[in-house]
């Protein structure tokens, strides 16, 4: 099992955290984001949109992070998704909410403040409003449950973690602070050995 990505990339981190949770052996191949290696021909063979990560399981090539996380979990017997249809659908719902309603807003702040890719003031204002909407909805769930999709840690939790890590280092933090149950969730999950391993790998790279 080979994973192609950059240890600092949010989507790569979702896949690496999934692998760490499942204790699944893999080879990590560094595709250097800063050098634009995700746009090189070799990577475009694996990921035709020129994005990261990509997976190669003995010739079976897959891209799209959520599909990859679900594939890895299925290979390991389905430990990171509920087995009953309703709870599984809720985990799926929250994974979709991450990509449709949450991460793009968080990433505007990450681009502007951490990656130094300037975002106009009105873009940041709209991102802040979008983030508040998503956090408010997430906060209601997390006020009643320890994890995003219920009583157990799932892929849904993994999908939000990289954005919390980065966005909380930016002024977007003020939006999170309005919703304490989201920060309580973050303090629960950020100490998981899987996440510490992924963050540690990035620090060592
Ligand atoms: N829908 C893709 C998105 C992947 C993605 O946006 N990856 C980022 C890094 S975290 C990337 O490669 N960005 C560069 C680009 O879009 O050109 C997935 O879920 O895998």
Image: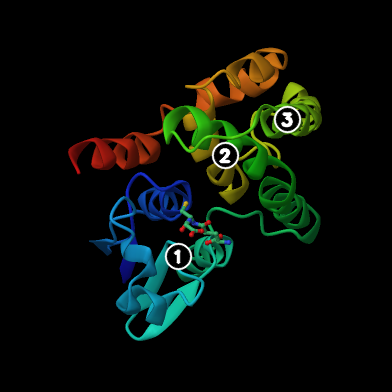
> What crowding class fits label 1: few (fewer than 14 Cα within 10 Å), some (14-19), or many (20 or more)?
some
**Residue occupied by mark 2:** 107
In the rendered image, which quarter contains the C terminus? top left
Q: Which mark is residue 108?
A: none
Residue farthest to the bottom? 59
In the rendered image, which quarter contains the N terminus? bottom left
Ligand 1 contact, mark 2 (Cβ < 8 Å): no
Q: Residue at x 46, y 46 (%)?
A: 10
Image color mode: rainbow
> What crowding class fits label 3: few (fewer than 14 Cα within 10 Å), some (14-19), or many (20 or more)?
few
| Marks 3 and 1, the one that precedes in the sequence | 1
The answer to the question of whether label 2 and label 1 lie on touching residues, with beta carbons closer than 8 A, is: no
| Marks 2 and 1, the one that precedes in the sequence | 1
Q: In the image, is 37 to the left or to the right of 112?
A: left
Ligand 1 contact, mark 3 (Cβ < 8 Å): no
Select label 2 or label 3 by which is in front.
Answer: 3
The answer to the question of whether label 3 and label 1 lie on touching residues, with beta carbons closer than 8 A, is: no
Q: Residue at x 57, y 31 (%)?
A: 109
**Residue occupied by mark 1:** 76
């Amino acid at each position: 099992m080979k994973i192609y990505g950059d240890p600092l990339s949010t989507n790569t981190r979702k896949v690496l955290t999934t692998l760490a949770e499942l204790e699944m052996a893999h080879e990590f191949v560094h595709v250097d984001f800063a050098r634009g290696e995700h746009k090189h021909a070799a990577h475009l063979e694996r990921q035709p949109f020129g994005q990261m990560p990509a997976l190669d399981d003995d010739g079976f090539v897959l891209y799209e992070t959520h599909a990859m996380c679900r594939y890895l979990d299925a290979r390991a017997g389905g430990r990171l998704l509920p087995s009953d249809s309703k709870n599984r659908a809720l985990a799926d719902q929250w994974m979709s909410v991450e990509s449709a309603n949450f991460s793009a807003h968080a990433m505007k702040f990450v681009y502007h403040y951490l990656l130094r890719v300037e975002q106009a003031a009105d873009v940041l204002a709209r991102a802040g409003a979008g983030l508040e909407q998503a956090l408010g909805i997430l906060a209601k769930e997390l006020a009643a449950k320890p994890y995003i999709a219920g009583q157990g840690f799932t892929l849904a939790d993994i999908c939000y973690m990289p954005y919390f890590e980065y966005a909380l280092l930016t002024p977007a933090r003020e939006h999170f602070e309005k919703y304490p149950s989201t920060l309580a969730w973050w303090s629960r999950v950020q100490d998981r050995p899987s996440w510490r391993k992924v963050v540690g790998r990035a620090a060592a790279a």
